[in-house]
């Protein structure tokens, strides 16, 4: 409350000059910062883009990119935007000698939200027109928990490829775990955890993500409780 009730400085010439200098300096810093971010972005004609497996026309990776590992195994389609503070990683370590030529594929006209991470070891395939919210995490490898005499951080599970279909939307904070498949034109709600298969043209939410409605051709949107169930032959 003392901050709200503090006395304002006297409106002297010195005070006015001081605050004018602060405002002008802030504007200059802001303009310079914006310019530097634009110049540091990775576009299709930059030298850094040539390090990627492919980098499509009209695509842009915003600055800063928090981490970039083995770009030679990462492919970016045309017209795709990767927002700032993202992580793009292929393989287990930089300059991995036996790395496949394509580990991470991001299709055309995609939007990868700010602060997202795409970490592939075997295969992450993201189709065309896929958009994500902020802070989405996609990985095809996870930790195991089989032994109690070994730290969990050093117990590795086998890699399982991930496929995200064309036109999908992944909400803010979504986590996509190894082996997941998200269908074409499907929505995953914010903060959901995908740990399996999400069919085409549906909405899934929760942890783990469950389908709450899907689009049936000729019928429209239906929820799982509205769909006819197969007869229980075990009780017949």
Image (cartoon, rainbow, N blue to C red):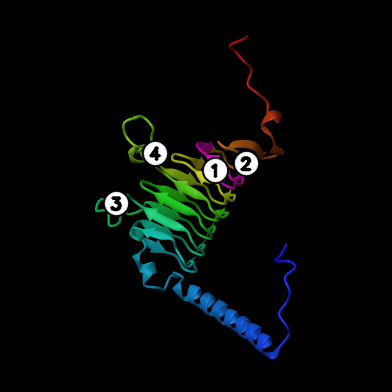
| Sequence-first disc among 2 and 4 | 4
Compared to residue 112, the image places residue 12 above or below, namely below
Q: Mark 2 points at which residue?
A: 202
Q: Name the residue under label 3.
A: 99
Residue occupying the point 37% across, 69% down = 48
- Mark 3 falls on what kind of element? loop
The residue segment tinted magenta is 182-197
Q: What x and y, as percent, mark residue 110?
A: 53, 58
Q: Name the residue under label 1.
A: 183
- Marks 1, 3: nearer the viewer: 3
Q: Nearer the viewer, residue 165 or 83?
A: 83
Mark number, residue 102: none
- Mark 2 falls on what kind of element? strand
- The answer to whether mark 2 and mark 4 are in CB contact below 8 A is no
Q: What x and y, as percent, mark residue 136?
A: 52, 51
Q: Is the magenta stretch mostly helix, strand or loop?
A: loop
Q: How crowded is mark 3: few (under 14 residues within 10 Å), some or many (20 or more)?
A: some
Mark number, residue 143: 4
Q: What x and y, as percent, mark residue 221?
A: 70, 40
Q: How crowded is mark 1: few (under 14 residues within 10 Å), some or many (20 or more)?
A: many
| Sequence-first disc among 1 and 2 | 1
Compared to residue 87, the image places residue 201 above or below, namely above
Q: How crowded is mark 4: few (under 14 residues within 10 Å), some or many (20 or more)?
A: few
- Marks 2, 4: nearer the viewer: 4
């Amino acid at each position: 409350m003392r901050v709200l009730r503090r006395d304002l400085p006297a409106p002297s010439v010195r005070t006015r000059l001081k605050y004018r200098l602060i405002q002008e300096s802030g504007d200059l810093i802001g303009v310079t910062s914006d310019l530097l971010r634009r110049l540091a972005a990775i576009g299709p004609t930059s030298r850094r883009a040539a390090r990627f497996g492919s980098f499509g026309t009209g695509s842009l990776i915003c600055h800063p990119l928090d981490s970039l590992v083995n770009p030679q195994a990462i492919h970016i389609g045309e017209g795709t935007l990767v927002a700032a503070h993202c992580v793009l990683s292929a393989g287990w370590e930089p300059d991995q000698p036996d790395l496949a030529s394509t580990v991470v594929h991001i299709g055309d006209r995609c939007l990868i939200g700010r602060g997202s991470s795409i970490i592939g070891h075997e295969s992450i395939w993201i189709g065309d027109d896929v958009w994500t919210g902020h802070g989405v995490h996609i990985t095809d490898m996870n930790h195991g928990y089989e032994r109690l005499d070994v730290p969990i951080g050093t117990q590795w599970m086998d890699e399982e490829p991930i496929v995200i279909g064309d036109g999908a939307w992944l909400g803010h904070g979504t986590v996509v775990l190894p082996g997941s498949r998200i269908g074409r034109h499907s929505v995953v709600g914010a903060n959901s955890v995908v740990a399996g298969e999400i069919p085409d043209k549906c909405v899934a939410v929760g942890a783990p993500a469950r389908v709450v409605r899907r689009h049936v051709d000729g019928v429209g949107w239906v929820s799982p409780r509205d769909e006819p169930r197969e007869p229980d032959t075990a009780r017949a």
